Image (cartoon, grey):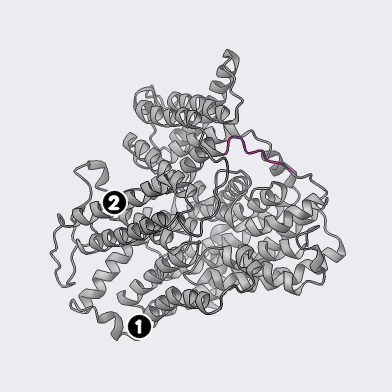
Amino acid sequence: MKRPELAIGIGTLLLGGLIAAGATQISSDAGYAGVGPNFLPLVVGALLVVCAIGLLREVFAGGFRDMEEPSGAEHGDWKGFVWVSVAILANAALITTIGFILSCTLCFVLAVRGFRWSQGRVDWSAPTWIVDALIGFAIAAPVFWMFTQLLAINLPGLTSTGWL
Amino acid sequence: MDTLNQLLQGFATAGTPINLLWALLGCTIGTAVGVLPGIGPATAVAMLLPITLKVEPTASMIFFAGIYYGAMYGGSTTSILLNTPGESGSMVTAMEGNKMAKSGRAGAALATAAIGSFVAGTIATVLVTFFAPVVAKYAIKLGPPEYFMLMLLAFTTVSAVLGKSTLRGLTALGIGLAMGLIGIDQISGQARYTGGVPELMDGLEVVLIAVGLFAVGEALYNVLYEGRVVESQNRMSKVHMTGAEWRRSWPAWLRATFIGFPFGTIPAGGSEIPTFLSYATEKKLSKNPKEFGTVGAIEGVAGPEAANNAAITATLIPLLTLGIPTSNTTAILLGAFQNYGIQPGPQLFDTNAALVWALIASLYIGNVMLLILNLPLVGLWVKLLKLPKAPLYAGILIFATVGVYGMRQSAFDLVLLYAIGLLGVVMRRFDFPTAPVVVGMILGPLAEAQMRNALSIGEGRWTVFLQRPGSLFLLVVVLAVLVLPRLIKRFRPPMEPDAMTRV
């Protein structure tokens, strides 16, 4: 039995159950329609539970059927994955305090490490860090200026000048 | 004549310098995202949705349509020159295009793809011009029961018919519908599944789902599994077609246009089926069948590329006249309309005639721009293929941040973005289709409203869906779409194994 597929089946079952359980908390006041705001949630919950049962049946019968062979390596490169994950989450945590440009530059530098790691070409020397930071800045800054100056859409800055 | 008048007015609007500039910008960005791996038209339009906050609707719809179109042109360049297709509609082009490029005829393949896209795109735009108003005129007679059935049909085809497994398609649809439930119920004003988190009261943004599934999901998938994949690039040759190649290409373009167009108009979108059909047709009709799969047959590139563009253009008919999206990108375009408080549907041709006709006119203009951008300037785009992967994907993460943060100014959304990216990785790894998620999320709330309105008309009785001939007919179609393929499979076991697996 394939464990990830089992996990997907169970996850779908939980999601369906959660949605169906949540539906009982929603009013069923129907007005003229005969079905209220809780109707579709019940249907979606039921759909997911039925799908989950179908998926689990396939898992116990040897795995998902009619699968397209996934592209790429058989096993994931989790170290590279952690770098990219940290990059995205750090960006989420820091964007309002250090501003869009710096936060995205940091995200870029961390993510590039992750992608290079997965390609087996990571280079820890100081110049590459600086070059990556410059490239990240060169992408993030014009994007920021285009949004804040040209389109007048708010993005968080370190200062309130709209330039950094 | 009325149609021509309105089209001329559309040209007047679309032809202003500022709108031409938006069209050119859209076509350029579109071609670039089509060429670049890791980012497609759906993602690009989604990331740029924040501009709907400030830019006026006509300009931004022209811009988005340019991206949508441009990506189709650009995608063929990648699929001919690299051995990985840039976007799914180009998968078939890659089969023959690659073979041609390997035998030193990359230039001819690129030329027939671009000119074929232009021919098919233009003919399809003419058809849209004349058919869309007619469809709108009939669609205006449809009531909530018929609309609900049409949407049900869209759900069924997107999840159950396209893709390899009905079960995984329906699971994806369920996830999309569940995402659409979050937020305030349109009819009763009740909050559902917000868990008291104020950020969830307004529901999830399309940008978040699309960018999460496609951009972040793609980046995470790449770092996890594709770091060591080595790509080989085919050599360019002069972009030129000989007389013989012209003679072999043009019938394929025309046939493919008429194969592709009908598939785009029915709510069963996706360009995979018409491109495969066109490929199979060309293979059967060709006078040089030995070239298929060996040195590369030019018909095998000309046909599918034209079918792809015709189908893509035709998807605008259900989008504009019924408000029903049949693909990822049209679902996001619907989101763009909604951001302006415009609901596409039959009334659109009356209430927003100027916008619709400017959009259609811009398709004619865009096709010409794209032909120029993709033939003489193709060398420029080929250089994009040389960009190293690591900074490319890291850069996509920056654009993802702008798109999602710019929409709602919420750092919470960036955490959700990561979570949805993870979902995207799992879905891609285990072959779950993504279109049902996006279509379900956007169309789910609309379908729910139509269903409840229909039931109100029927005073709470479900038989309302059976009593009206239109909705009964559509219900039968839905059932047929679900049942027929299964019956055919059962009663006609292994029919041409080669045709079924590869085509």
Residue ID at (79%, 50%): B102
- Contact check, label 2 and label 1, Cβ < 8 Å: no
Q: Looking at this view, is A17 or B490 the one in front?
A: B490
Residue ID at (51%, 38%): B219
* Image: B42 above or below B479: above
How far apart marks 2 and 1 lie (CA) works out to: 33 Å
Q: Amino acid at mark 1?
A: Leu
Q: Is residue B256 magenta?
A: no
Residue B410 picture location, percent across and down: 33, 37
The residue identified by callout 2 is: A15
Q: Which residues are magenta?
A: B226-233
**Which image quarter: residue B409?**
top left
The residue identified by callout 1 is: B472
**Which image quarter: residue A53?**
bottom left
**Which image quarter: residue B280?**
bottom right
| Protein chain holding label 2 | A
Secondary structure, magenta segment, majority class: loop
Q: SS class of the residue under badge 1?
A: helix
Residue ID at (32%, 66%): B447
Q: Amino acid at mark 2?
A: Leu
* Image: B260 above or below B211: below
Residue B224 picture location, percent across and down: 51, 36
Q: Looking at this view, is B166 or B456 the one in front?
A: B166
Quadrant of image for the C terminus of chain A: top left
Q: Looking at this view, is B282 or B432 the one in front?
A: B432
| Protein chain holding label 1 | B
Image side of residue A52 versus residue B427, left or right: left
Q: SS class of the residue under badge 2?
A: helix
* Image: B346 above or below B387: below
* Image: B109 above or below B409: below
Residue B28 picture location, percent across and down: 62, 47
Label 2 Cα crowd, 10 Å radius (few <14 / some 14-19 / many 20+) = some
